[in-house]
Image: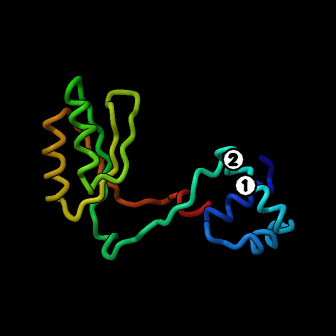
Amino acid sequence: MDELDNKIIRLLMRNARMPVKEIAQQVNLTSPAVSSRIHRLEQEGVIGGYTVLLHQPGEAARVQALISIQTTGAAREDFLRMIPGEPQILQCYRVTGSYNFIVKVSCASIDELEHLLTRMQKLGNTNTQIILATPLDRRLTL
């Protein structure tokens, strides 16, 4: 990857639907050259896909948190079966360290967060951090 590839990626991260012609103008290349670079980046796995980020009404009023959970044995499998059915769970990471998993959740209220935590605590020890702000989110801009 060179600096032109990085510029193209940054433009696509800001707007994945940006026309190739506009990208070409901003990086001083022809449209076919930009299309070729984008295709190569996709083939190499640098660009893994394109997505839409939804912002739901009242999202700022939701309680977002990171929950670390330490499970053992059968509880680990129970946890992995439980999480797809919990719409509050946005992401789940398998991690090293004192905990097996870290999940990012978005709940409508503290009560909803507490209810989710109660279910998780049946499967293992938890540690929760409530997210106060997101000063940087590279998924949205670069």
Q: Is residue 108 above or below residue 97?
A: below
The tag on residue 89 is none
Q: Callout 2: 10 Å neighbours few (<14), some, many (20+)?
A: few
- For numbered disc 1, what is the local secondary structure? helix
Give the Cα separation between the discs numbered 1 and 2: 6 Å
Residue 28, x across and y down, in percent: 86, 68
| Residues at discs 1 and 2 in contact (Cβ within 8 Å) | yes
Q: Is residue 132 left or right of residue 72?
A: right
Name the foreground residue: 82 vs 100. 82
Q: Name the residue located 81 percent from the left edge and 73 percent from the top edge.
A: 25
Q: Is residue 71 left or right of residue 9?
A: left
- For numbered disc 2, what is the local secondary structure? helix
Quarter holding residue 133: bottom left
Q: Name the residue located 14 percent from the left edge and 44 percent from the top edge.
A: 119
Tag 2 residue? 43
Name the foreground residue: 12 vs 65. 12
What's the amino acid at mark 2? Answer: Gln
Quarter holding residue 134: bottom left
What's the amino acid at mark 1? Answer: His
Q: Is residue 36 left or right of residue 17?
A: right
Name the foreground residue: 93 vs 135. 93
Count of numbered labels shown in the rendering: 2
Q: Name the residue located 36 percent from the left edge and 44 percent from the top edge.
A: 92
The tag on residue 39 is 1
Q: Callout 1: 10 Å neighbours few (<14), some, many (20+)?
A: few
Specify the quadrant that holds the C terminus. Answer: bottom right
Q: Is residue 45 above or below residue 73?
A: below
Q: Name the residue located 84 percent from the left edge and 61 percent from the top edge.
A: 33
The structure's colour scheme is rainbow
Q: Is residue 45 left or right of residue 120?
A: right
Residue 71, x across and y down, in percent: 24, 29
